Every structure is written in structure tokens, then in C-alpha cells.
């Protein structure tokens, strides 16, 4: 659910929302169906005022990019081609992370 900060406060009584200029509470990762969809999402975010948060990561079998929305929250868009995961990838693969 995406809601305005004032409304969000009602969902977290007794706590303050994170100050996204100095902290990050979560990294929301969104799986998409292709590398092109990853790029399309980031390009759309940038055109609407967000910014790319870090450089893209391309492991061949997994491709991801991250962005910061206009409220300072960090998101990641990623695509995994499970058929391309090497037997011994250079980056660790959590078998619970990859779904087919």
C-alpha cells in the first residue's frame, strides 16, 4: 500500500517514519519479466522525478537496477533467468530466492 506520510503515521502508532535522507528502513525489490522491463521501470521513474540509486548489476543470469523514489525510498527492479544460473556463480545464490 502506498499512502501519504500523514496517513502512514496512523499505521505506526508510537513510532516515527524513517527519515529517508539519512536512513533506509527497507529495500523493496520487484521482479519483472525481462531485462527490458527493468530498464523501462527505471527510465519511467527517472522521467517522473526519481533517481537511479546505484549502477546496474549484471551477472548474466540476473540483471537489476535500483532507484530512489521522490520520497527517498529505495526500490530495486530485477530479472532472473533461472535457466542461465551457472553451476558455480561468482555471486552466491540463495535457492529460496530463485523461483521458477
Image: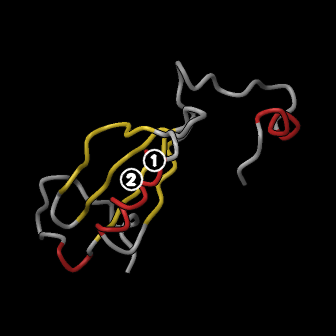
Helix, strand or loop for disc 1: helix
Left or right of 85? Residue 95 is right
Q: Residue furthest front?
A: 47
Choose top left, top right, bottom left or bottom right for residue 16: top right
Do the residues bearing badges 1 and 2 touch, measured as CB atoms within 8 Å? yes
**Which residue is at a point 53% across and 40% down the rendered structure image?**
69
Left or right of 23? Residue 16 is right
Q: Nearer the viewer, residue 75 or 27?
A: 75
Instruction: Give how far apart the Cα atoms at labels 1 and 2 are.
Output: 6 Å
**Which residue is at a point 42% across and 43% down the rendered structure image?**
67
Against 25, residue 87 (above or below) is below
Q: Which mark is residue 47?
A: 1
Q: Position of residue 26 (x, y in %)?
A: 54, 40
**Which residue is at a point 26% across and 76% down the rendered structure image?**
82
Q: Position of residue 36 (x, y in %)?
A: 31, 68
Q: Which residue is mark 2?
A: 43
Determine crowd level at label 1: few under 14, some 14-19, many 20+ residues with C-alpha closer than 10 A: few
Q: Position of residue 89 (x, y in %)?
A: 13, 60
Q: Nearer the viewer, residue 57 or 43?
A: 43
Against 45, residue 30 (above or below) is below
Figure quadrant of the C terminus: bottom left
Amino acid at each position: 500500500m502506498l499512502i501519504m506520510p500523514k496517513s502512514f503515521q496512523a499505521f505506526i502508532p508510537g513510532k516515527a517514519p524513517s527519515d529517508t535522507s539519512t536512513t533506509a528502513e527497507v529495500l523493496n525489490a520487484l521482479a519483472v519479466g525481462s531485462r527490458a522491463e527493468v530498464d523501462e521501470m527505471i527510465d519511467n521513474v527517472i522521467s517522473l522525478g526519481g533517481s537511479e540509486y546505484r549502477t546496474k548489476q549484471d551477472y548474466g543470469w540476473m540483471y537489476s537496477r535500483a532507484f530512489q523514489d521522490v520520497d527517498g525510498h529505495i526500490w530495486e527492479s530485477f530479472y532472473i533467468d533461472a535457466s542461465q544460473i551457472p553451476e558455480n556463480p561468482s555471486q552466491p545464490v540463495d535457492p529460496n530466492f530463485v523461483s521458477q
